[in-house]
Image (tube, grey):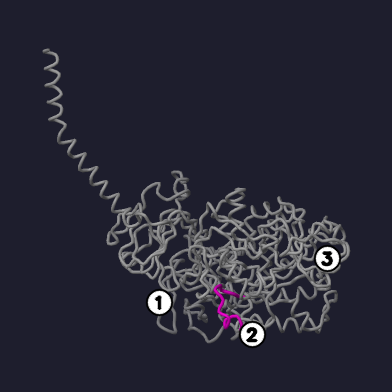
């Protein structure tokens, strides 16, 4: 009994002692419950993807719920795959909150996308629970903090990515543009085709008001036809000059590059290609090639195709792109084709390629691709051909019939491993090589290429990570063309200041539905598509009343008047203006004790003290002489790197290279601006 009383008394004493701690714990738990409720309450019961009017503060799971609070660093481990994968000492993933201002958090946006897994390949961002504020057609902010919006799209459980860019498409006809939207495509560029007159072409489609952005190449095959040059004939010297005139006019009128279809016009010889590739190099635009050969049977093999195209890059300095390498150039020996690209890039050549997400190709039966011997070349027979838009397989008799009619047939002729190898290459992006047309005599890639790339090759086969595939679908196509196309510098990315061309999809369900029999079936799993900040597809359904697409054009800056004079230790150097900045001839540094050493692989000048020599493109430049008016000013990707981490992009003017005045500041000089006169001093 005594033991029991003592025990009871001890427990009572302990209870009294612990009572304050228990009360404190209850208060803490209650506060935590309130905090949790306030964070989740704004979205309670809201289905992922639901769009709603929300003029008040948007509340976001996992945030502090107070738009007025000072921006904080994100919670450790709250950033999805990339955050959790970071090890101590490794580069940390990009933090979108680091540049967010209080003004941006306090703003009310036209549209806010909340709680999404935002992927931006350019910065390596891949993080869940982020919010995007859009004003007009522009992304204003990306943050983990809550935002206010007139319209809110809940992207919880969904991926938010840059709108897909189909750089290997055709004319944006009124039917096909809608299955492009349903496939996540926001920019449709006809680089495997195009036009000989971009001014007329762009004006026409601007009047049509498609929902996607659009642009085109100078289409050499169409130009040849207009001059009466047969598909098996070589152009005469006079015809080549005419083609050059047409191409140069087209570039100045907005064409994004030059495209050849060598297999479909086998008479095209190297004289014609070299003349136009040199023009492309002069204008700093890429040349797209449908290669000459698509098989491994002599004479004329896929290796010959790759050598020919890479050879044009080597001889002219032009950037080149290999169309659909899975069906032309690498079908039967993809590893070798990709190795050739890698070796060419190691030389400093600008070579890329694209593929589509299918192991069967399709083209018109009356094309040169089906000339005599096609069975041996492609290792297929009549029964391996199917008329697109039907279930009909061909025979010798129906082949002859449909060839006369010019029908498009699908050919089951690509080894599946070739597509997989192409996707693994860091130099291969995605292009559909199709757009749906009336009659549905189209390959299913016209409607399902982009969703299939993610659904099959990322989710199911795990060929590449999702962020890498988004790069191939969005960022890489933009970068391939953006040097002379300023509009594309704001596309293919999700970041502050970029165009609000955005696709929101469910990674668990995104897939193509289009088939050979039904190429018109739209993709599934894509919940929203925004083009310039306007919702064109909502809850998987297109809104055909919303048509924000606009024409995309090449633009060229030329030398005009002098932008002033730079005075440096008694010498005078003319300045030129380029995109709101003033530039000086980089070789002026050689007259002030600096040497310039050119690296032709990285296209970089290393600037070092104690020398006065310059090689590479700038060799022989006269920095004291003003460039001739009208000469093109081009961003070729050249850079200068100097002591102390000084680094800048250069502008090419003819054979000369120019650097911004800010580079001198990086080198430790004081640059005083007195209007037309700039003085440089130590």
| C-alpha distance separating marks 1 and 2 | 47 Å
- Of badges 1 and 2, nearer the viewer stands 2
Q: Give above or below for 257 relative to 45.
A: below
The magenta segment: 204-215
Circle 2 SS class: helix
Asked whether 56 falls inside the magenta stretch, the response is no
Circle 3 residue: 370
Q: Mark 3 or mark 2: name the one nearer the start of the chain.
A: 2
Cβ–Cβ below 8 Å for labels 3 and 2?
no
- Label 2 Cα neighbours within 10 Å, binned few <14 / some 14-19 / many ≥20: few
* Residue at (71, 65) in percent of width and height: 389
> Which image quadrant for residue 402?
bottom right
Q: Dividing the image into 4 quarters, which one contains the N terminus?
A: top left
Say few, some or many: other residues with alpha carbon within 10 Å of mark 1 (under 14 / 14 to 19 / 20 or more). Answer: few
**210 in the magenta segment:** yes
Label 3 residue SS: helix
* In-front residue for pair 167/8: 8
Element under disc 1: strand
Residue at mark 1: 672
Residue that carries the numbered disc 2 in the rendered image:
200
| Image side of residue 410 versus residue 370, left or right | left
Q: Does residue 558 appear in this view?
A: no
| Res. 651 image quadrant | bottom right
Q: CA distance from mark 3 to mark 1?
A: 67 Å
* In the image, residue 606 above or below residue 424: below
């Amino acid at each position: 009994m005594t033991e029991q009383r003592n025990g009871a008394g001890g427990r009572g004493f302990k209870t009294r002692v612990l009572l304050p701690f228990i009360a404190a714990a209850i208060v803490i738990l209650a506060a935590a419950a309130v905090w949790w409720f306030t964070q989740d309450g704004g979205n309670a019961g809201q289905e992922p993807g639901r769009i709603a009017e929300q003029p008040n503060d948007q509340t976001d799971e996992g945030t502090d719920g107070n738009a007025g609070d000072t921006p904080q660093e994100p919670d450790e481990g709250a950033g999805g795959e990339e955050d959790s994968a970071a090890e101590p000492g490794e580069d940390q993933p990009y933090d979108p909150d680091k540049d967010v201002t209080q003004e941006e958090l306090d703003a009310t946006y036209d549209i806010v996308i909340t709680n999404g897994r935002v992927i931006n390949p350019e910065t390596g961002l891949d993080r869940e629970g982020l919010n995007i504020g859009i004003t007009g057609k522009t992304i204003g902010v990306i943050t983990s903090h809550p935002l206010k919006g007139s319209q809110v799209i809940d992207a919880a459980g969904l991926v938010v990515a840059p709108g897909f860019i189909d750089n290997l498409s055709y004319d944006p006809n009124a039917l096909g543009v809608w299955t492009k939207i349903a496939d996540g495509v926001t920019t449709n560029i006809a680089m495997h085709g195009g036009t000989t007159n971009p001014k007329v072409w762009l004006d026409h489609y601007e009047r049509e008001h498609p929902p996607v952005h659009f642009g085109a190449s100078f289409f050499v095959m169409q130009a040849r036809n207009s001059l009466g040059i047969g598909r098996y004939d070589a152009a005469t010297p006079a015809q080549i000059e005419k083609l050059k005139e047409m191409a140069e006019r087209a570039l100045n009128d907005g064409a994004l590059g030059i495209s050849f279809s060598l297999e479909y016009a086998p008479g095209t010889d190297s004289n014609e290609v070299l003349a136009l590739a040199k023009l492309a190099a002069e204008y700093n635009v890429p040349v797209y090639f449908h290669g000459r050969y698509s098989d491994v049977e002599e004479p004329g093999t896929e290796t010959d195709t790759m050598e020919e195209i890479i050879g044009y890059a080597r001889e002219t300095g032009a950037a080149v792109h290999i169309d659909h390498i899975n069906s032309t150039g690498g079908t039967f020996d993809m590893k070798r084709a990709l190795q050739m690209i890698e070796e060419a890039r190691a030389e400093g050549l600008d070579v890329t390629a694209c593929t589509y997400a299918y192991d069967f190709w399709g083209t018109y039966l009356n094309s040169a691709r089906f000339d005599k011997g096609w069975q041996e070349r492609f290792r297929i027979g009549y029964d391996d051909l199917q008329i697109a838009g039907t279930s009909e397989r061909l025979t010798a008799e129906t082949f002859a019939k449909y060839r006369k009619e010019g029908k498009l047939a699908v050919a089951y002729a690509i080894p599946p491993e070739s597509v997989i190898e192409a996707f693994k290459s860091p130099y291969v992006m995605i292009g559909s090589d199709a757009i749906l047309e009336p009659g549905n005599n189209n390959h299913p890639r016209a409607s399902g290429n982009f969703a299939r790339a993610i659904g099959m090759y990322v989710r199911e086969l795990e060929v590449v990570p999702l962020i890498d595939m988004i790069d191939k679908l969005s960022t890489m196509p933009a970068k391939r063309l953006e040097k002379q196309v300023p509009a594309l510098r704001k596309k293919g990315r999700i970041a502050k200041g970029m165009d609000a061309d955005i696709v929101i999809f469910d990674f668990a369900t995104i897939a193509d539905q289009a088939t050979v029999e039904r190429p018109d079936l739209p993709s599934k799993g894509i919940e929203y598509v925004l083009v310039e900040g306007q919702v064109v597809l909502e809850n998987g359904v297109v809104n055909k009343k919303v048509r924000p697409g606009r024409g995309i054009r090449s633009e060229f800056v030329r030398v005009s008047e002098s932008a002033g004079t730079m005075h440096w230790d008694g010498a005078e150097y003319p300045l030129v203006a380029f995109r709101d900045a003033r530039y000086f001839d980089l070789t002026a540094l050689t007259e002030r004790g600096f040497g310039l050493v050119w690296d032709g692989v990285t296209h970089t000048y290393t600037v070092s003290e104690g020398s006065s020599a310059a090689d590479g493109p700038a060799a022989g430049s006269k920095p004291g002489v003003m460039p001739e008016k009208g000469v093109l000013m081009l961003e070729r990707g050249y850079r200068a790197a100097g002591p102390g981490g000084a680094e800048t992009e250069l502008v090419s003017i003819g054979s000369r290279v120019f650097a911004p005045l800010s580079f001198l500041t990086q080198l430790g000089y004081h640059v005083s601006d007195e209007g037309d006169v700039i003085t440089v001093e130590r």
